[in-house]
Image (cartoon, rainbow, N blue to C red):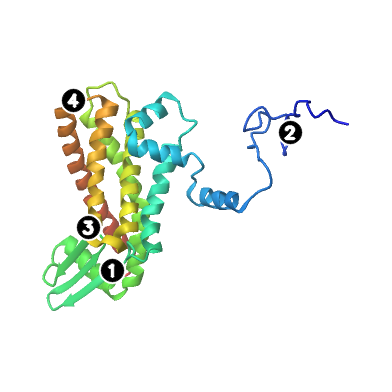
Amino acid sequence: MTDAGAPAQPAACRNCGATLLGPYCHSCGQRRRRGHPTVRMLVEECVEALTHLDRRIGSTLRGLVLRPAALTRDWIAGAVANQVPPLRLFLAMVLLVFLVPEIVGQAPVGRVVTHEAATGGTLSGTGYSLTVRGGGRNDRVGGWLGPKVVAAMRQPESFGRAVETWAHRLSILMLPLLALGLALLFVRRAFSFYDHFIFAMHSLSFAGLAMVLRSLILPLVGPASGGLLLLWPIHLWMHMRGFYGTSIAGTSARTLALVCFSLLAFMAIVALNVAMALAEIRA
Protein backbone atom coordinates (compact mmCIF):
# COMPACT_ATOMS: atom_id res chain seq x y z
CA MET A 1 0.00 0.00 0.00
CA THR A 2 1.29 3.42 -0.91
CA ASP A 3 1.75 5.86 1.96
CA ALA A 4 -0.71 8.75 1.50
CA GLY A 5 1.83 11.16 2.91
CA ALA A 6 4.60 10.16 0.50
CA PRO A 7 5.72 12.83 -1.96
CA ALA A 8 4.31 12.56 -5.48
CA GLN A 9 6.54 10.99 -8.06
CA PRO A 10 7.95 13.43 -10.66
CA ALA A 11 6.21 13.30 -14.02
CA ALA A 12 7.87 11.63 -16.97
CA CYS A 13 8.04 12.95 -20.54
CA ARG A 14 5.42 11.22 -22.68
CA ASN A 15 7.81 11.24 -25.64
CA CYS A 16 11.15 10.00 -24.30
CA GLY A 17 10.39 9.05 -20.68
CA ALA A 18 12.89 11.46 -19.09
CA THR A 19 12.00 12.95 -15.71
CA LEU A 20 10.43 16.38 -16.15
CA LEU A 21 11.98 19.26 -14.22
CA GLY A 22 9.83 22.01 -15.73
CA PRO A 23 7.27 22.75 -18.46
CA TYR A 24 9.63 21.38 -21.15
CA CYS A 25 11.61 18.16 -21.34
CA HIS A 26 15.35 18.82 -20.95
CA SER A 27 16.09 15.77 -23.10
CA CYS A 28 13.86 16.07 -26.20
CA GLY A 29 12.27 19.52 -25.77
CA GLN A 30 8.63 18.38 -25.82
CA ARG A 31 6.23 20.57 -23.83
CA ARG A 32 4.67 19.00 -20.76
CA ARG A 33 0.99 18.16 -21.22
CA ARG A 34 -1.33 18.19 -18.23
CA GLY A 35 -4.35 15.91 -18.41
CA HIS A 36 -6.28 14.81 -21.48
CA PRO A 37 -6.26 17.10 -24.58
CA THR A 38 -9.28 19.42 -24.87
CA VAL A 39 -11.08 21.20 -27.69
CA ARG A 40 -9.54 24.47 -26.46
CA MET A 41 -6.06 23.01 -26.93
CA LEU A 42 -7.04 21.92 -30.45
CA VAL A 43 -8.23 25.45 -31.32
CA GLU A 44 -5.01 26.94 -29.92
CA GLU A 45 -2.95 24.54 -32.04
CA CYS A 46 -4.95 25.48 -35.16
CA VAL A 47 -4.45 29.21 -34.55
CA GLU A 48 -0.74 28.66 -33.94
CA ALA A 49 -0.41 26.59 -37.13
CA LEU A 50 -2.20 29.21 -39.27
CA THR A 51 -0.58 32.35 -37.84
CA HIS A 52 2.63 30.94 -36.27
CA LEU A 53 1.60 32.59 -32.99
CA ASP A 54 1.66 30.78 -29.65
CA ARG A 55 0.59 31.47 -26.09
CA ARG A 56 3.08 34.31 -25.79
CA ILE A 57 0.87 36.45 -28.04
CA GLY A 58 -1.10 37.85 -25.08
CA SER A 59 1.92 39.24 -23.24
CA THR A 60 3.46 40.38 -26.53
CA LEU A 61 0.37 42.35 -27.58
CA ARG A 62 0.08 43.92 -24.12
CA GLY A 63 3.67 45.03 -24.34
CA LEU A 64 3.23 46.22 -27.93
CA VAL A 65 0.28 48.43 -27.00
CA LEU A 66 1.27 49.63 -23.53
CA ARG A 67 5.09 49.33 -23.34
CA PRO A 68 6.47 49.24 -26.90
CA ALA A 69 9.88 50.65 -26.03
CA ALA A 70 10.38 48.10 -23.24
CA LEU A 71 9.24 45.31 -25.57
CA THR A 72 11.86 46.29 -28.15
CA ARG A 73 14.60 46.78 -25.55
CA ASP A 74 13.86 43.41 -23.93
CA TRP A 75 14.14 41.56 -27.23
CA ILE A 76 17.43 43.22 -28.13
CA ALA A 77 18.77 42.50 -24.62
CA GLY A 78 17.85 38.81 -24.97
CA ALA A 79 14.85 38.67 -22.58
CA VAL A 80 12.73 36.83 -25.15
CA ALA A 81 11.00 34.00 -23.27
CA ASN A 82 7.66 35.83 -23.04
CA GLN A 83 7.71 37.37 -26.51
CA VAL A 84 6.58 36.23 -29.93
CA PRO A 85 9.58 36.76 -32.25
CA PRO A 86 9.22 40.20 -33.91
CA LEU A 87 9.44 38.88 -37.48
CA ARG A 88 6.81 36.21 -36.79
CA LEU A 89 4.55 38.86 -35.23
CA PHE A 90 5.02 41.18 -38.21
CA LEU A 91 4.27 38.46 -40.78
CA ALA A 92 1.20 37.34 -38.84
CA MET A 93 -0.11 40.93 -38.79
CA VAL A 94 0.45 41.21 -42.55
CA LEU A 95 -1.59 38.04 -43.00
CA LEU A 96 -4.40 39.34 -40.78
CA VAL A 97 -4.48 42.73 -42.54
CA PHE A 98 -5.43 40.93 -45.77
CA LEU A 99 -7.49 38.13 -44.22
CA VAL A 100 -9.78 39.95 -41.76
CA PRO A 101 -11.46 42.29 -44.31
CA GLU A 102 -12.50 39.28 -46.38
CA ILE A 103 -13.80 37.46 -43.30
CA VAL A 104 -16.00 40.42 -42.28
CA GLY A 105 -17.23 40.93 -45.84
CA GLN A 106 -15.28 44.02 -46.91
CA ALA A 107 -13.99 44.61 -50.42
CA PRO A 108 -10.78 42.62 -50.99
CA VAL A 109 -7.52 44.33 -51.85
CA GLY A 110 -7.67 43.08 -55.41
CA ARG A 111 -11.15 44.40 -56.25
CA VAL A 112 -10.99 46.51 -59.41
CA VAL A 113 -13.41 49.16 -60.66
CA THR A 114 -13.15 49.98 -64.37
CA HIS A 115 -14.50 52.87 -66.38
CA GLU A 116 -14.25 53.34 -70.13
CA ALA A 117 -14.64 56.58 -72.03
CA ALA A 118 -13.82 57.95 -75.47
CA THR A 119 -10.64 59.50 -74.13
CA GLY A 120 -9.29 56.33 -72.55
CA GLY A 121 -9.90 54.20 -69.49
CA THR A 122 -9.60 54.20 -65.70
CA LEU A 123 -8.63 51.42 -63.30
CA SER A 124 -9.41 51.96 -59.62
CA GLY A 125 -8.76 49.74 -56.65
CA THR A 126 -7.74 49.80 -53.01
CA GLY A 127 -5.34 52.72 -52.63
CA TYR A 128 -4.92 53.64 -56.30
CA SER A 129 -6.64 55.08 -59.36
CA LEU A 130 -4.99 54.88 -62.77
CA THR A 131 -6.31 56.82 -65.77
CA VAL A 132 -4.93 56.54 -69.30
CA ARG A 133 -5.95 59.05 -71.94
CA GLY A 134 -6.42 58.10 -75.53
CA GLY A 135 -3.70 60.45 -76.74
CA GLY A 136 -1.03 59.24 -74.32
CA ARG A 137 0.43 56.35 -76.31
CA ASN A 138 3.15 58.14 -78.22
CA ASP A 139 5.87 57.90 -75.56
CA ARG A 140 7.47 54.63 -74.47
CA VAL A 141 5.69 54.43 -71.08
CA GLY A 142 2.31 55.30 -72.58
CA GLY A 143 2.86 52.80 -75.37
CA TRP A 144 3.30 50.03 -72.77
CA LEU A 145 0.78 51.30 -70.22
CA GLY A 146 -2.15 52.04 -72.52
CA PRO A 147 -2.62 48.52 -73.93
CA LYS A 148 -2.03 46.99 -70.49
CA VAL A 149 -4.75 49.11 -68.89
CA VAL A 150 -7.17 48.25 -71.70
CA ALA A 151 -6.37 44.55 -71.25
CA ALA A 152 -6.80 44.82 -67.47
CA MET A 153 -10.19 46.48 -67.97
CA ARG A 154 -11.24 43.52 -70.08
CA GLN A 155 -9.97 41.07 -67.45
CA PRO A 156 -10.79 42.74 -64.10
CA GLU A 157 -10.91 39.46 -62.16
CA SER A 158 -7.49 38.32 -63.38
CA PHE A 159 -6.02 41.76 -62.74
CA GLY A 160 -7.58 41.85 -59.27
CA ARG A 161 -6.03 38.51 -58.37
CA ALA A 162 -2.64 39.74 -59.61
CA VAL A 163 -2.96 42.92 -57.53
CA GLU A 164 -3.78 40.92 -54.41
CA THR A 165 -0.92 38.47 -54.98
CA TRP A 166 1.63 41.23 -55.45
CA ALA A 167 0.24 43.17 -52.48
CA HIS A 168 1.08 40.20 -50.25
CA ARG A 169 4.58 39.93 -51.72
CA LEU A 170 5.45 43.62 -51.67
CA SER A 171 3.96 44.57 -48.29
CA ILE A 172 7.08 43.24 -46.57
CA LEU A 173 9.10 45.99 -48.30
CA MET A 174 7.78 48.45 -45.71
CA LEU A 175 10.00 46.73 -43.14
CA PRO A 176 13.45 47.46 -44.64
CA LEU A 177 12.28 50.89 -45.81
CA LEU A 178 11.16 51.89 -42.31
CA ALA A 179 14.40 50.52 -40.85
CA LEU A 180 16.35 52.55 -43.41
CA GLY A 181 14.41 55.68 -42.46
CA LEU A 182 15.24 55.09 -38.79
CA ALA A 183 18.91 54.54 -39.60
CA LEU A 184 19.03 57.88 -41.41
CA LEU A 185 17.25 59.70 -38.59
CA PHE A 186 19.55 58.27 -35.91
CA VAL A 187 22.78 58.07 -37.89
CA ARG A 188 24.76 59.80 -35.13
CA ARG A 189 23.46 57.62 -32.31
CA ALA A 190 24.87 54.31 -31.09
CA PHE A 191 22.25 52.01 -32.58
CA SER A 192 22.86 49.20 -35.04
CA PHE A 193 20.75 48.42 -38.09
CA TYR A 194 19.55 45.33 -36.22
CA ASP A 195 18.12 47.60 -33.50
CA HIS A 196 16.28 49.63 -36.13
CA PHE A 197 14.91 46.45 -37.71
CA ILE A 198 13.47 45.20 -34.41
CA PHE A 199 11.95 48.62 -33.76
CA ALA A 200 10.45 48.65 -37.27
CA MET A 201 8.96 45.17 -36.84
CA HIS A 202 7.25 46.16 -33.60
CA SER A 203 6.08 49.52 -34.95
CA LEU A 204 4.63 48.05 -38.15
CA SER A 205 3.02 45.24 -36.15
CA PHE A 206 1.13 47.88 -34.16
CA ALA A 207 0.13 49.61 -37.41
CA GLY A 208 -1.16 46.26 -38.67
CA LEU A 209 -3.06 45.73 -35.42
CA ALA A 210 -4.73 49.14 -35.85
CA MET A 211 -5.72 48.22 -39.42
CA VAL A 212 -7.17 44.90 -38.28
CA LEU A 213 -9.21 46.60 -35.54
CA ARG A 214 -10.44 49.13 -38.08
CA SER A 215 -11.64 46.33 -40.36
CA LEU A 216 -13.47 44.70 -37.45
CA ILE A 217 -15.36 47.84 -36.36
CA LEU A 218 -15.91 49.32 -39.83
CA PRO A 219 -19.31 47.61 -40.25
CA LEU A 220 -20.40 49.11 -36.89
CA VAL A 221 -19.18 52.71 -37.05
CA GLY A 222 -18.52 53.27 -40.76
CA PRO A 223 -15.85 55.75 -41.94
CA ALA A 224 -15.27 56.93 -38.38
CA SER A 225 -13.24 53.75 -37.89
CA GLY A 226 -10.48 55.41 -39.90
CA GLY A 227 -9.56 57.30 -36.74
CA LEU A 228 -7.88 54.14 -35.48
CA LEU A 229 -5.19 54.59 -38.13
CA LEU A 230 -4.16 57.82 -36.38
CA LEU A 231 -3.06 55.72 -33.43
CA TRP A 232 0.07 54.66 -35.30
CA PRO A 233 1.77 58.11 -35.37
CA ILE A 234 0.93 58.55 -31.67
CA HIS A 235 2.25 55.10 -30.86
CA LEU A 236 5.33 55.75 -33.02
CA TRP A 237 6.07 58.92 -31.02
CA MET A 238 5.83 57.07 -27.68
CA HIS A 239 7.80 54.09 -29.01
CA MET A 240 10.56 56.28 -30.43
CA ARG A 241 10.91 58.50 -27.38
CA GLY A 242 11.05 55.54 -25.02
CA PHE A 243 13.46 53.43 -27.06
CA TYR A 244 15.84 56.03 -28.49
CA GLY A 245 15.69 58.40 -25.53
CA THR A 246 15.23 61.54 -27.63
CA SER A 247 13.82 64.84 -26.39
CA ILE A 248 10.17 65.82 -26.91
CA ALA A 249 11.09 68.20 -29.73
CA GLY A 250 13.53 65.73 -31.31
CA THR A 251 11.02 62.90 -31.13
CA SER A 252 8.27 65.06 -32.64
CA ALA A 253 10.45 66.17 -35.56
CA ARG A 254 11.64 62.63 -36.26
CA THR A 255 8.13 61.19 -35.99
CA LEU A 256 6.82 63.71 -38.53
CA ALA A 257 9.72 62.95 -40.88
CA LEU A 258 9.25 59.19 -40.53
CA VAL A 259 5.48 59.37 -41.10
CA CYS A 260 6.01 61.41 -44.28
CA PHE A 261 8.72 59.00 -45.42
CA SER A 262 6.43 56.03 -44.71
CA LEU A 263 3.59 57.56 -46.74
CA LEU A 264 5.91 58.12 -49.70
CA ALA A 265 7.23 54.56 -49.37
CA PHE A 266 3.68 53.21 -49.21
CA MET A 267 2.66 55.10 -52.37
CA ALA A 268 5.77 53.81 -54.16
CA ILE A 269 4.91 50.23 -53.14
CA VAL A 270 1.31 50.68 -54.36
CA ALA A 271 2.61 51.97 -57.71
CA LEU A 272 5.01 49.02 -57.96
CA ASN A 273 2.17 46.67 -57.03
CA VAL A 274 -0.04 47.97 -59.86
CA ALA A 275 2.87 47.90 -62.34
CA MET A 276 3.75 44.29 -61.49
CA ALA A 277 0.09 43.25 -61.76
CA LEU A 278 -0.23 45.00 -65.13
CA ALA A 279 2.91 43.23 -66.35
CA GLU A 280 1.18 39.87 -65.81
CA ILE A 281 -1.82 40.84 -67.96
CA ARG A 282 -1.56 39.88 -71.59
CA ALA A 283 -2.34 42.87 -73.77
Indicate the amino acid at tag 4.
Ser
- CA distance for labels 2 and 3: 55 Å
The mark that comes first in sequence, 2 or 4, is 2
Q: Which mark is residue 12?
A: 2
Residue at the far top in the pictured view: 190
In this rendering, the answer to whether 190 lies above or below 262 is: above
Residue at the far front in the pictured view: 4
* Residue corresponding to mark 3: 224
SS for callout 1: loop
Q: Are marks 2 and 4 in contact (CB under 8 Å)?
A: no
The mark that comes first in sequence, 1 or 2, is 2
Indicate the amino acid at tag 2.
Ala
The percent coordinates of residue 235 (x first, y second) are: 26, 39
Residue 209 visible in the shown view: yes
SS for callout 2: loop
The mark that comes first in sequence, 3 or 4, is 3
**Circle 1 crowding by C-alpha within 10 Å: few under 14, some 14–19, many from 20:** many
- CA distance for labels 3 and 1: 24 Å
Q: Which mark is residue 112?
A: 1
Q: Quadrant of residue 270?
A: bottom left
Q: Residue at x 51, y 43 (%)?
A: 54
Q: Name the one closer to the observer, 201 or 140.
A: 201
* Residue corresponding to mark 4: 247
Q: Residue at x 42, y 47 (%)?
A: 92
- CA distance for labels 4 and 1: 45 Å
The percent coordinates of residue 78 (x first, y second) are: 45, 25
Q: Quadrant of residue 85?
A: top left
**Circle 2 crowding by C-alpha within 10 Å: few under 14, some 14–19, many from 20:** some
The mark that comes first in sequence, 3 or 1, is 1
SS for callout 3: helix
